[in-house]
Image (cartoon, rainbow, N blue to C red):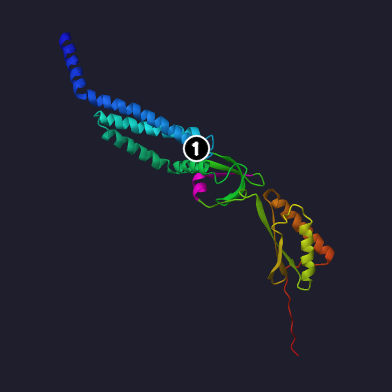
Amino acid sequence: MENFDIEKISNWLYDLAVTKGVTILIALVVLIIGLWVIKISVNSLSKMMEKKNTDPSLRPFLKSMASVLLKIMLIISVMGMMGIEMTSFIAILGAAGLAVGLALSGTLQNFAGGVMLLIFKPFKVGDFIEAQGFMGTVHEIQIFNTILKTPDNKTIIIPNGGLSTGPMTNFSTEPTRRVDFSFGIGYSDDINKAKSVLERVLTSDSRIHKDPEPFIAVGELGDSSVNFTVRVWADGADYWGIHFDTIEKVKKEFDKAGISIPFPQTDVHLFTEK
């Protein structure tokens, strides 16, 4: 019995070597070449991410994910070449992946959004942005969420899915910003005098750029006032300082010059019958 079993096994191995030997050899060659190609591809991906200035914390993750996915595809292909039935296995794997994907659709969307933000960099840590109805300074970009700090020191956590697909304003992209004002004077006040006061206030502030020069013009004849439109350019870091300081200086200078800043009012005319 023992001799019969050994002989049977030997015959089976011989038949397998004869019938499947070439196929197995080809599969091994494909496996070796495939692993070599995957290694080259992953290294090329790494170099491309370096040229694109991809976030350093994201590079190892993307390299590992690409390597794992390519190796799984290679192994499935090699097993198919060797005659191993993979249809049922792939179907089960696909069904499981679909179920997990449906259960984690929101999380996967945020994950994909985080990857897109880290790759394309529409903003970086330290930028002041407005998105999803919130404004604040970017404190941290995580793989699922982005954390903002508001000017009054509140922490805002925004999911990356909506942040990567929705509209977003980055106030820190450009080095300079335009500061807009509207100042009203009374209808009885001298327009030229008020304009001179505004020019003096603006030229006295060294933070305001001379090129392009400040813009001052009568923008509207309102219900109770003549409104000046004032626009100046400055460094982005000086925006709020110029905004608040200029409003205060204009009020003080208008008071000194005897120029009124009217408030909404209504004139009521009474008529009596004779």
Q: Which residue is mark 1?
A: 49
Number of other residues with Cα within 10 Å of mark 1, as a class: few under 14, some 14 to 19, many 20 or more: some
Identify whether 67 is placed above or below 127: above
Q: Quadrant of residue 81?
A: top left
Task: Kindly identify the residue that appears in the image at 34 percent across and 28 percent down.
Answer: 33
Task: Kindly identify the residue that appears in the image at 17 percent across and 9 percent down.
Answer: 2
Given residues 210 and 261, the one toward you in this image is 210
Identify whether 55 is placed above or below 30: below
Left or right of 147? Residue 36 is left
Q: Position of residue 100 (x, y in %)?
A: 39, 38
Task: Kindly identify the residue that appears in the image at 50 percent across and 37 percent down.
Answer: 49
* Image quarter of the C terminus: bottom right
Left or right of 43? Residue 147 is right
Q: Position of residue 114 (x, y in %)?
A: 50, 41
The part of the chain drawn in magenta is 154-165
* Image quarter of the N terminus: top left
Left or right of 96? Residue 64 is right
Q: Position of residue 236 (x, y in %)?
A: 67, 50
Q: Point out the residue furthest to the bottom here.
A: 274
Report the amino acid beneath label 1: Met
Identify whether 128 is placed above or below 80: below
Magenta-colored stretch includes residue 19: no
Q: Is residue 162 visible?
A: yes
Magenta-colored stretch includes residue 159: yes
